[in-house]
Amino acid sequence: MYSVAVVNTILLLALPLWGLLAGPAATPPPTLTLRDGRTFQLAAPARQENGRVIFTTTEGKTYSLDAADVRSAVDRPPASTRTPKVYNPMDSQNLGAIAREERAKTGKTTELSSPRATASPGKPRPTRSPTPGAKKTPRPTRTPTPVPH
């Protein structure tokens, strides 16, 4: 018999290989639901032509139905939704994001919170350049004058 250590080593080496052999998880096939409640598993996504929905089931049968008889056609499973980010109101770095969320909830906008206006493409933006040779002169200091008693 093999020792426990040898069996554990073999299992640890075999598990990743088993995952490679299994392949990626299969996505469910497209589904078509009719108004009367019947559902069909589709071999390929349904297509619409001249007000009719044409589809082929996984059994190989092809159907052509009036578009009004179809309730919904799902080509792929719904995408997972991300959970919204929750900000800590006690963290001062998050205050700007919290304020933006509150303004968005209440529908308030200000010049500061609205998106930045872009400069018109025809006008160049002014730039500030230092003046050569200009020196700052010191400001005179004011000395208090003595008040006679």
Image (cartoon, rainbow, N blue to C red):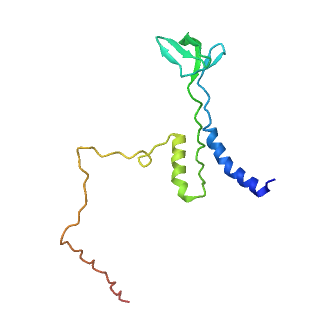
Q: Residue at x 23, y 50 (%)?
A: 124
Q: Position of residue 32 (x, y in %)?
A: 60, 19
Near-viewer residue (53 or 22): 22
Near-viewer residue (56 or 93): 56
Q: Quadrant of residue 42?
A: top right
Q: Quadrant of residue 71?
A: top right
Q: Position of residue 25 (x, y in %)?
A: 62, 36
Q: Quadrant of the C terminus?
A: bottom left
Rendered position, 36 above or below 27: above
Left or right: residue 133 versus residue 55 is left
- Find the residue positioned furthest to the front: 1
Rendered position, 78 above or below 93: above
Near-viewer residue (4 or 43): 4
Near-viewer residue (14 or 120): 14
- Find the residue positioned furthest to the bottom: 149
Q: Residue at x 65, y 13 (%)?
A: 36
| Figure disc tally | 0
Q: Position of residue 144 (x, y in %)?
A: 34, 84
Q: Position of residue 58 (x, y in %)?
A: 61, 20
Q: Residue at x 58, y 42 (%)?
A: 82
- Find the residue positioned furthest to the right: 1
Q: Residue at x 41, y 45 (%)?
A: 115
